[in-house]
Structures are given as C-alpha cells and as structure tokens.
Image (cartoon, rainbow, N blue to C red):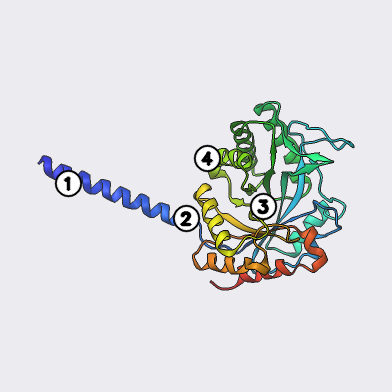
C-alpha cells in the first residue's frame, strides 16, 4: 500500500515538473514585428511624419526625454517632478494625436532620464522613495495624458542613489501607472556598464514582470563590433534579463556597436531564424533624418517579412 502511494506521489511530482517546464517554455519570448525609434532629443526639427512607417509592423516612437530637472539655465534635480525636454515644437500633443490617427499601428511613449540635461549629466537623485514616486506619478500622468501617450521607457544613465532605491522608485512608478491604466507598456534601456547594470538588474529582479521590453543599448559597445561578438552580447544580456524581450539596436550616426555595413541586419536575420528577434530599435530619428532613414526602412522590412 505504501509503495503504491509513493508511486502515485512520484508520478504527480513528475507531471507537475513537466507542466511547469512546458509553461516556462511557452512563456519564452519569440520573434516579434516590433520597431521602436527614439525621437526629439537633438532638436534637429524631425517630425513624426518624416519617419517612414511600414503598416505591417508594430511601431513605437519614444519621445526623448522627460527629465525630473527644472528648466532653468542651469537645471537642477526636482525629485520626481518631470518636465518635457524633447523638441515639443515639432512633436506636440496634436502631432502625437495625428500620427496615431493616420497610422493605426503606431504608439507613442516617452523616455525618462537620458544622458544629459543642460551642460551636465542627468542624475537619478531622489530625496526619498515615497516622495519621488508620488511626484513622478503625478507629473508623468499629467504629461502622458496631455500628450496622448501610451507608454514609458526608463533611460537613466547616471545615479546618485543605490540600486535598491532605483529599483523601488522605478518599479513602483511603472506599477502605479499600469494599475491606473495611464500606460499600456513599459521598457528599460540599460547598457553594458557596471553601475548602470547594477541598477537595472536590481529593478529587473524585483519588478521584471512589469517590464515589457528591454531596449538594450548594443550600440554602446565598441564601434568595431562583429556579428559573432554581437550575437554573444545578445545572448549574455538575454541571460541577464532572463525571460525578457531584449530588443536589438543600432545607432544611426555609426558611432558605436555593430553597423549595417558590418552585418547588423545579418545578425538580426540570424536571431530571427532562432526565434530570438524580439524587435529592433534605433537611436535616433534625429540623426537618421539627414540620410533619409534607410535603416528604419530596412529594419521594418525585415520585421514585416514572413517568418
């Protein structure tokens, strides 16, 4: 009798493990037709309507940036009270509404933080978790609603806080905005730097379930990056952000990472053949405008092609 009970229990355990494994496999991200582009940071008069939009992709514009600094000549941190620092003259609320109405496959988000503000770095510098979250939820909700936006991207690159404080502030911000139905997606934009990774991985470990996309800045690697190196970098970061939709990326001014000339689209096709191409993003529309957006067209054509 005892042996038959043990046998049944063993069978149930094996079945549970199999189901669990199957669920994990099913949850692994697959190929996507998502294309994302940062826009508005460099004030080069680029408009949404300048950028080619393929109707067969999911397209996200990311307005760059909203920053929790004041707008004085020498900007200072404001502890979560965000202001618009993108080219709002060319990328206004009416422009957002228009591009979304014209192209039903377009969503528009805003990116917060960024590298610099005024003549200095843009630091993540909260006074306390509670006060920063309260201010950020309030100010960003207002900006998001006023500009008809759909989501948020986290792009802080300099920190005057520890990783756990960053994780708690950003995690609670995203969770609250989603619970309040202010946003429908959230992404993070880390790159391979020890301080940056320590902050974003702390956030991922605690709030990864709230983060829809990882806009990993692969163009922050060396300019001479090769296809095998790029694939290796991608696999490493996919392991770091385990279970996340890690997007591949390039910079349109050619200053870093794997360039199209050196095989960026070859690498994308290789990842696609392995069901690992979760999307492509480009920094930035501002730099692409002068060349007529060739890489935006090529990226979207690849994403829109049948698997």
- The residue singled out by tag 2 in the image is 28
Q: For residue 141, which quarter of the picture?
A: top right
Q: Nearer the viewer, residue 290 or 176?
A: 290
- The residue singled out by tag 3 in the image is 220
How far apart marks 1 and 4 lie (CA) works out to 37 Å
Number of numbered discs overlaid on the protein picture: 4
Local secondary structure at mark 2 = loop
Q: Nearer the viewer, mark 3 or mark 4?
A: 3
Q: Nearer the viewer, mark 4 or mark 2?
A: 4
How far apart marks 3 and 4 lie (CA) works out to 23 Å
Instruction: Name the spot of residue 264 as percent of width and height, x first.
Output: 63, 65
User: Badge 3: few (under 14), some or many (20 or more) residues near its Cα, within 10 Å?
Assistant: some
Q: Nearer the viewer, residue 101 or 204?
A: 204
Q: For residue 285, which quarter of the picture?
A: bottom right
Residue 7, disc: 1
Residue 205, disc: 4
Quadrant into which the N terminus falls: top left
Q: Earlier in the sequence, mark 3 or mark 2?
A: 2
């Amino acid at each position: 009798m005892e042996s038959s009970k043990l046998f049944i229990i063993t069978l149930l355990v094996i079945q549970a493990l199999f189901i669990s494994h199957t669920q994990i496999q099913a949850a692994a991200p697959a190929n996507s037709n998502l294309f994302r582009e940062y826009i508005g940071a460099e004030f080069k008069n680029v408009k949404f309507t300048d950028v080619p939009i393929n109707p067969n992709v999911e397209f996200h514009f990311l307005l760059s940036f909203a920053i929790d600094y004041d707008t004085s000549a020498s900007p200072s941190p404001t502890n979560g009270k965000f202001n618009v620092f993108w080219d709002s003259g060319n990328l206004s609320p009416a422009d957002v509404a228009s591009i979304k109405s014209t192209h039903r496959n377009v969503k528009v988000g805003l990116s917060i933080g960024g590298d610099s503000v005024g003549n200095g770095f843009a630091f993540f510098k909260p006074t306390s978790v509670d006060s920063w979250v309260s201010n950020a939820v309030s100010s960003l909700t207002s900006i998001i609603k006023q500009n008809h936006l759909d989501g948020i991207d986290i792009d802080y690159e300099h920190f005057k806080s520890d990783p756990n404080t960053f994780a708690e502030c950003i995690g609670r911000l995203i969770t609250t905005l989603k619970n309040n139905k202010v946003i429908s997606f959230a992404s993070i934009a880390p790159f391979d730097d020890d301080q940056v990774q320590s902050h974003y991985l702390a956030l991922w470990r605690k709030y990864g379930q709230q983060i829809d996309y990882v806009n990993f800045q692969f163009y922050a690697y060396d300019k001479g990056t090769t296809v095998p190196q790029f694939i290796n970098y991608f696999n490493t970061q996919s392991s770091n952000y385990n279970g996340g939709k890690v997007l591949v990326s390039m910079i349109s001014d050619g200053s870093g990472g794997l360039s199209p000339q050196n095989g960026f689209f070859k690498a994308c096709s290789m990842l696609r053949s392995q069901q690992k191409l979760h999307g492509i993003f480009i920094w930035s529309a501002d730099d692409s405008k002068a060349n007529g957006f060739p890489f935006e067209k090529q990226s979207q054509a690849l994403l829109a092609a049948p698997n």
